[in-house]
Image (cartoon, rainbow, N blue to C red):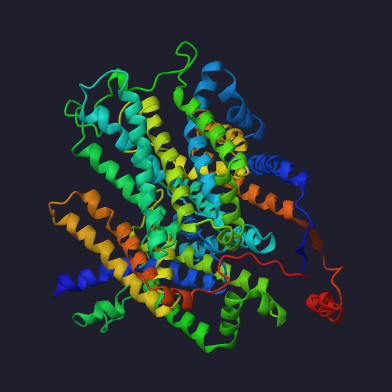
Amino acid sequence: MMRLELVKRPQRSMLFSALSPFIAFALTIIAGAVMFALLGVNPLTAFNIYFIEPISQVWQLHELAIKAAPLILIAVGLSVCYKANIWNIGAEGQFILGGIVGSMVPVLFPQFEGPLVLPLMLLLGMVGGAAYAAIPALLKTRFGTNEILTSLMLVYVAQLFLDWLVRGPWRDPQGHGFPQTIQFNDSAVLPELMPDAGRANWGFVFALVAAVLVWILMGRMLKGFEVRVLGSSPRAGRFAGFGLNRMVFFAFLLSGALAGLAGISEVSGAIGQLQPVISPGYGFTAIIVAFLGRLNPLGIVAAGLVLALTYLGGEAVQSALGISDKVARVFQGMLLFFVLGCDTLIHYRIRVIGLALTKPEGVAKLEAAPKLKEAR
Amino acid sequence: MDITVNILLTIATAATPLLIAAIGELVVERSGVLNLGVEGMMIMGAVGGFGATYLTGSPWIGLLAAIAMGAVFSLLFAVMTLSLATNQVATGLSLTLLGLGLSGMMGTSFVGQPGERLPNLYIPGLTEIPVVGRLLFGQDPIFYISIALTAAVMWFLFKTRTGLTLRSIGDSHTSAHALGIKVIRYRYLAVIFGGACAGLAGGHLSLVYTPQWVENMSAGRGWIALALVVFASWRPWRVLAGAYIFGAVWIGQLHAQAFGIPVPSQFLSSLPYLATVVVLVLISRNKRLTMMNTPASLGQPFVPDR
């Protein structure tokens, strides 16, 4: 039987570290071509519609920025978590809570206008996201509860809570029964960057600023060092006096606040009111963005733009070819798979062992005792 | 009386997919592998089961297709984590994301199509016995599979040599490897078994629970199954108990909504998810219990050093 064997590299390969996202992207394109062919569409036509046409005009680049902003904001926060080996996968819920808490200002006090409204909303959005992220952090530090499952369960709870709000107490009485809140007043809407050219709003700027700040934090400051040490070796971290519990809170609060900021920016900028569904799965797609960007904030900016394109492309093939826009999800999933697979190349060389090369049983057994050889 | 029987039957129907998926994941985790892709494998099983039934007209072929779909999909996870030693948490997540997308795409043409339900067991004479008849002899076939599966896994893990080997791999893959046990091969089989179970659980959703295709119809059940394994501290009979408790919560909130209890339906719908969090907290407070039962090498990648 053919099988693969991994041979550990003495050092991590710088070459593959840089190449791996590109190889992964190329493999995704190949797999995507096969998929389109199976669906009976010429892959070249499909790729043109999927990847080229959605970004061939200036206003479309603005749409790209709108989709990329929440992905980058969330993924930058998640990268800190994952670097510290803390698994916050509930960013979708923190995004929603950020949207809800930030919207309290325009929904409950529609008469309140002026330059203070927006900063207050953004701040509340961050607080909302961080507070919601604090729940799994608290449960993990107090009781040792697995944060993966708790943070994910809270996503469902957040979605249902938002659904209740917009159908119940926060529904616009003049909204003809539609499940949505009132339209935000002008001072509660995140301004567009270049209204003449397209719809992109300040959310994209927030994303870039967050990426640069976290990049400085991770690369230039003690806290970043602490994150990396605790992530790769909690034991070494303890000897250095770094507290794991404090780190859990730091990572969850930071990523929750950024997800919350993404949520309120999306609601106030791109939507302008609360609706039952305010996210096409940004919180989950951001996980892919974080890994594709190698958990590096600057890499994440690039990865966020790529994943934003998969959303736009999904919409484009749906309207042009009648293929379900779920194709975007498939592309995103495949991309993450290939990225993770290619990352193996950074640490290992892969040897393919075929039938003919299988060693005789005895030799294989002898070699199977490396500990003995090393001991000598 | 009749109403009690009906409620018990619906609880069993709600518990069955949770039980099957959790039992499969239990075997996977006992071998030391953490597959967070249960939700993705489940939804693939659901769409595969519905699709095959729709195309062939036979829900039995649908059942087999659901199992096969889950198993094949889990193979993807196995190749990545076992042969390429990727991070299990991230790979499992991507399996779920891919599964949700792929099933949505494959199922586009199934939306709104009528489905075919797997027929309930009917044994003349026995099924008509009042009260216990329908509970024991009148349920859907997957219910019986789920009970048999639980018993079989219990016997396999704790009464057979192979089961002991599997558990030893989960506790220390390096020691098992040093003893000459084929760690990777065992884990491949365990992961594929878990995938087949998750696929079957998904098949239950689209062939018994609500015989139709609805996007994202697994609604977090895969994640609840993962929580059940932790809740059960990796013991099959506790998974059985936990699955029925969650089945009762799931049905309870549906009945409460139907009775028009003056609580918003969204709050009732969020009960199973909140219950999961509460249960996880309660179980993890007991550090000794969790520490003693958690497979020691759970989630750690293993690369045999030749």
Furthest-top residue in this view = A196
Q: How many numbered circles does the render carry? A: 0
Q: Can residue B218 be seen at all in this image of the molecule?
A: no
Q: Where is residue A149 in the image (x, y as percent from the top left)?
A: 42, 58
Q: Is A65 left, or right, of A277 in this rendering?
A: right
- At horizontal 38% and vertical 59% (from top left) the residue drawn is A139
Left-right relation of A32 to B12 = right
B204 or B291, nearer to the observer: B291
Residue A138, quarter of picture: bottom left
- Where, by quadrant of the figure, is residue B250 drawn? bottom left
Where does the image place residue A265, in percent across and percent down from the top left? 40, 30
Please report the residue visible at 46 percent of the width from the left and 50 percent of the height from the top: A89
Up/down of B200 relative to A179, above or below: below
Residue A71 vs residue A37, the one in the foreground? A71
- Residue A160, how many percent across, how many down? 29, 47
Kindly indicate the quadrant of the structure image that contains residue B118: bottom left
